[in-house]
Image (cartoon, rainbow, N blue to C red):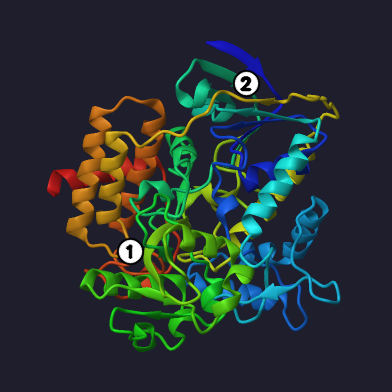
């Protein structure tokens, strides 16, 4: 095992990690990324945009109120207010990095509306290309920033923790297939994304399988709200992995959901119909699909001939699948999309382990509660990564380092198919901890997770299974339905459960032993 050292280590090459690194400049930073920066990031696939109260008539307080309402009773309002307050500043940072947000004829930022927002506040790029445009701009800026070294093809397997403080990381080269490398640092930032790839149908890339979360949990970090998984209602049902996303902005434009009989089924489920919160729409579509009636997003009247111009990304997805969205409804299905749970952090991104920070989807800040408001994900990533940089920067010793050109170390990276164990896990998570849950099904899923743990010794997969186990235990513990967590055996919200949940991996292990003993 070779040894290297570096002042600040950031694990993850998505929006949160890159933004944090840029905000830390000129302090020297090393970014460790399993895939080429930007490529393995869910942020790059985000279509709608970033939520910010930047238009006339909109306010921070309205944004907070919408966030709290969507979060179904357990949003940390202090965190939500902080996030909304800093939204405009972070959007202007992104503009400074070259993100070409849409503007109107007067040069003002152009905004659109999405489900559960009371105002138009989604800042976009060419309709549905925000995530891609943001990541392209940040990758280019990072590559031109001398203080940032990017090491691609490095899979971080373990955190080194000594006396309650981080001392470094252990990574493996060649996308996890090569030699181990130890990098020493007393400042580590986890920005590894969410857990969508734990599910058989997801909009997330294969890298989003909860490794960073599980790694922090195995090191002893406190987790929060691990039962809350958001399923995007309208992924294209075209047998692709990941499932292409039909952005919520389509429904914001007036697209309707219909079943095989042409019935607008959401009208009888919620007064807001297609613009109801995501968990409500996801369950509505799920019920139609499971009944055999199927579900389609009909954009023919609301968007029609302007589809290719207004939503080029979705248009390409549809045409690649042999669908003409101008004249045909689009088949849709719910897909694992966003994780409200994760590593517990404070308002500055500090975890329960000294020297360990976290930002982006791998965290649970309390900003989303039980159900994230649309387009608050990119916002949370930039707000809290900037706050981490400000806090870490305050401890800067004044040293700087020029990694110079050639700072991107690239291994020969190739995409790999899921292992047999990963395929088994994804099927179990979808069946047991998906859109709809119950005790018997969740216990069956937990047994599969435990069996996979007993039969697998791969270090990275250990982290994946730790995350899956935390989701399972948290979901079994919450005896109600709220937000993204819906149980048919406890279908109503219960006032005694109107709070966030916190646990460590050690807590989860005790619960697993109890459940397995009495199951």
Give me the C-alpha separation between circle 1 and circle 2. 41 Å
Q: Is residue 282 in view from this perspective?
A: yes
Give the camera-side residue of 441 and 344: 441
Left or right side of 437 for 177: right
In the image, 186: left or right of 171? right
Depicted 39 relative to depicted 94: above or below: above
At which x and y percent is residue 266? 38, 83
Residue at the image point whose x is 35% and y is 26% from the top:
458
Q: Vertical placement of 87 versus 211: above or below?
A: below
The residue to which callout 2 is attached is: 184
On the image, the x and y values in percent for residue 330 come to: 42, 70
x and y, in percent, of residue 17 in the image: 64, 42
Front-most of 72 and 52?
52
Residue 323 is situated, as x and y percent measured from the top left of the image, at: 43, 66
| Residue annotated with mark 1 | 435
Residue drawn at the location 32% of the way across and 33% of the way down? 419
């Amino acid at each position: 095992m070779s040894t290297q050292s570096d002042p600040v280590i950031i694990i993850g090459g998505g929006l949160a990690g890159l933004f944090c690194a840029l905000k830390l400049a000129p302090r020297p930073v090393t970014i460790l990324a399993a895939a080429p920066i930007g490529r393995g990031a869910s942020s790059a696939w985000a279509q709608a945009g970033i939520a910010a109260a930047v238009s006339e008539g909109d306010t921070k307080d309205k944004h907070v109120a919408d966030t709290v309402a969507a979060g179904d009773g357990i949003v940390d309002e202090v965190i939500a207010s902080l996030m909304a307050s800093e939204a405009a500043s972070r959007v202007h940072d992104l503009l400074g990095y070259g993100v070409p947000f849409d503007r109107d004829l007067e040069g003002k930022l152009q905004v659109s509306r999405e489900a559960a927002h009371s105002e138009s506040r989604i800042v976009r790029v060419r309709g549905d290309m925000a995530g891609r445009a943001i990541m392209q701009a940040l990758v280019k800026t990072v590559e031109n920033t001398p203080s940032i070294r990017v090491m691609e093809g490095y899979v971080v397997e373990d955190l080194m923790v000594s006396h309650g403080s981080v001392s470094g990381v252990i990574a493996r080269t060649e996308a996890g297939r090569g030699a181990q490398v130890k990098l020493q640092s007393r400042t580590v930032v986890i920005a590894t994304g969410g857990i969508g790839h734990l599910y058989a149908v997801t909009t997330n890339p294969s890298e989003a399988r909860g490794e960073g979360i599980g790694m922090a949990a195995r090191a002893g970090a406190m987790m929060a709200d691990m039962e809350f998984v958001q399923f995007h209602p309208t992924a294209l049902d075209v047998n692709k992995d990941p499932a292409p996303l039909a952005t919520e902005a389509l429904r914001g434009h007036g697209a309707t959901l219909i079943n095989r009989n042409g019935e607008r089924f959401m009208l009888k489920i919620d007064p807001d119909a297609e613009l109801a919160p995501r968990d409500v729409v996801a369950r509505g579509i799920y019920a139609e699909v499971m009944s055999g009636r199927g579900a389609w997003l009909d954009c023919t009247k609301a968007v029609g001939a302007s589809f290719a111009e207004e939503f080029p990304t979705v248009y390409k997805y549809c045409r690649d699948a042999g669908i003409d969205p101008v004249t045909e409804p689009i088949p849709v299905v719910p897909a694992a999309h966003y994780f409200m749970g994760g590593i517990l952090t404070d308002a500055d991104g500090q975890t329960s382990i000294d020297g360990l920070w976290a930002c982006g989807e791998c965290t649970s800040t309390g900003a989303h509660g039980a159900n994230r408001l649309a387009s608050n994900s990119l916002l949370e990533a930039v707000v809290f990564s900037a706050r981490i940089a400000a806090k870490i920067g305050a401890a800067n010793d004044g040293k700087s380092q020029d990694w110079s050109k050639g700072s991107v170390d690239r291994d020969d990276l190739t995409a790999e198919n899921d292992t047999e164990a990963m395929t088994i896990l994804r099927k179990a998570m979808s069946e047991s901890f998906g859109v709809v849950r119950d005790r018997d099904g969740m216990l069956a899923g937990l047994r599969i997770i435990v069996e996979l743990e007993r039969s697998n010794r791969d270090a990275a997969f250990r982290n994946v299974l730790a995350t899956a186990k935390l989701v399972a235990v948290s979901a079994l513990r919450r005896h109600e339905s709220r937000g993204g967590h819906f149980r048919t055996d406890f279908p109503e919200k219960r006032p005694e459960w109107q709070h966030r949940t916190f646990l460590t991996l050690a807590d989860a292990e005790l619960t697993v032993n109890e459940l397995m003993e009495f199951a």
